[in-house]
Amino acid sequence: MMGSRVAVMGFAVDTSWTDGCAVISVAGELDMGAESIVRACLEEVFAAPGAAVVLDLSATTFMDARGISILVAARAMAERSRVAFHVVGIRPRLRSTLKVVGLDTVFPDTHPDPYPT
């Protein structure tokens, strides 16, 4: 599969495939303005055959409640699809947000390399 890029007013989502692994990279704020775009990308990659889905947040500068709901929805999609799901590149500010809502252990930054093997 080929990669794609969606960019809107300072926000971008890139989707790429490497060895059966879909990598969705989010740049900018993961909030209400990004929600529909990121969810659509997640739905697309979970519908395609693949070994894993990686959500790379290394270029994500902010995450609010909508961003948290995106992570929770992605985890549910992964469970339904029986596909491995990893969140990587979690910056300290985002990690603090996850910790406040008790999701820091649900979404550990398990792979510093955004392309797990």
Image (cartoon, rainbow, N blue to C red):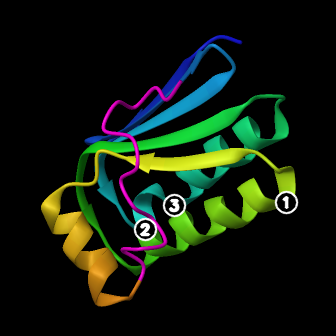
Give me the C-alpha separation between circle 3 and circle 2: 7 Å
**Mark found first going from the N terminus, 1 or 3:** 3
- Residue 108: x, y in percent? 39, 61
Residue beneath disc 1: 80
Identify which residue, 9 or 87, lies in the foreground. Answer: 87
Q: What residue is at 39 percent from the left and 87 percent from the top?
A: 102
Left/right of residue 76 with respect to residue 37 in the rendered view: right
Q: What residue is at 53 percent from the left and 74 percent from the top?
A: 69
Is 81 one of the magenta-colored residues? no
Identify which residue, 51 or 13, lies in the foreground. Answer: 51
Residue beneath disc 2: 67
Q: Secondary structure at mark 1?
A: helix
Q: Secondary structure at mark 2?
A: helix
Establish if 69 lies above or below 29: below
- Residue 7: x, y in percent? 40, 33
Q: Which residues are magenta?
A: 103-117
Give the label on residue 12, or none.
none
Foreground disc of the pair 2, 1: 1
On the image, which quarter does residue 2 sit in? top right
The three-letter code of the residue at mark 1 reads Arg
Residue sitting at the far bottom: 101
Residue beneath disc 3: 35
Give me the C-alpha separation between circle 1 and circle 3: 20 Å
**Mark found first going from the N terminus, 3 or 2:** 3
Establish if 59 lies above or below 106: above
On the image, which quarter does residue 103 sit in? bottom left
On the image, which quarter does residue 30 sit in? bottom left
- Tag 3 and tag 2, C-beta contact below 8 Å: yes
The three-letter code of the residue at mark 2 reads Gly
The three-letter code of the residue at mark 3 reads Glu
Foreground disc of the pair 1, 3: 1
